[in-house]
Image: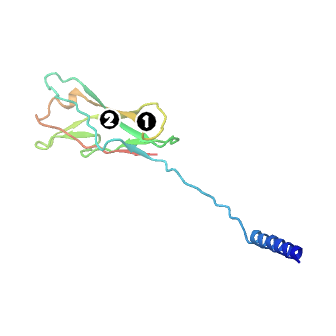
Amino acid sequence: MKRTGVILSSLGMVLLFAGMSMATGSNTLTVSANVMGTCKFSSASSTLGFGGLDPTVGTNVSATSTTQFWCTKGVTLDAITADNGAHFAASRNMQDPVSLDLIPYTLSLTKDANPNTGPLAPRTLTISGTVLGIDYTSKTAGNYSDTVVLTITP
């Protein structure tokens, strides 16, 4: 009888474990994310200063400035554009707020040749401009300025 009890008990355990393994199932979970292609300037503003324009000299004056930007690693179309400025009239112009005289200038943007690798390795944008001597020799003395918006898109 003891032997039968042990056998039945063992058989019960086998059936119990067999029932448990029949109750299990599985699920395959897919995990995903999308890294966005982003480009941003490192600072919100830059300055390109031509300094004092001396009408007695009347020579062309060039100026250069730089600003930093970064793009997500792998972004290859990092387009940087400049709008026409606040005083556009057939060309970009700086304006004296008192006399309203305009002084035209040119503007060019040149990115360094480095690849985009993210915010820890910003790149350099060189901003260059020129004022022709003939364009300021007959202007009213004053403080001329313009505001140009630079835009970067990935």
Seen from the viewer's position, the closer of residues 76 and 94 is 76
Residue 72: image location, x then y, percent:
47, 43
Taking 110 as reference, is 75 left or right? right
Residue 26: image location, x then y, percent:
70, 65
Label 2's element? strand
Residue lying furthest bottom: 1
Residue denoted by label 2: 107
Cα separation, mark 2 vs mark 1, equals 26 Å
Q: Amino acid at mark 1?
A: Ala
Mark drawn on residue 121: 1
For the point 22% across and 30% down, the residue is 50
Seen from the viewer's position, the closer of residues 100 and 7 is 7
Residues tagged 2 and 1 counted as in contact (Cβ below 8 A): no
Is the image coloured rainbow, by chain, by secondary structure, or in one colour?
rainbow
Quadrant of res 15: bottom right
Q: Amino acid at mark 2?
A: Leu
Circle 2 or circle 1, nearest the eye = 1
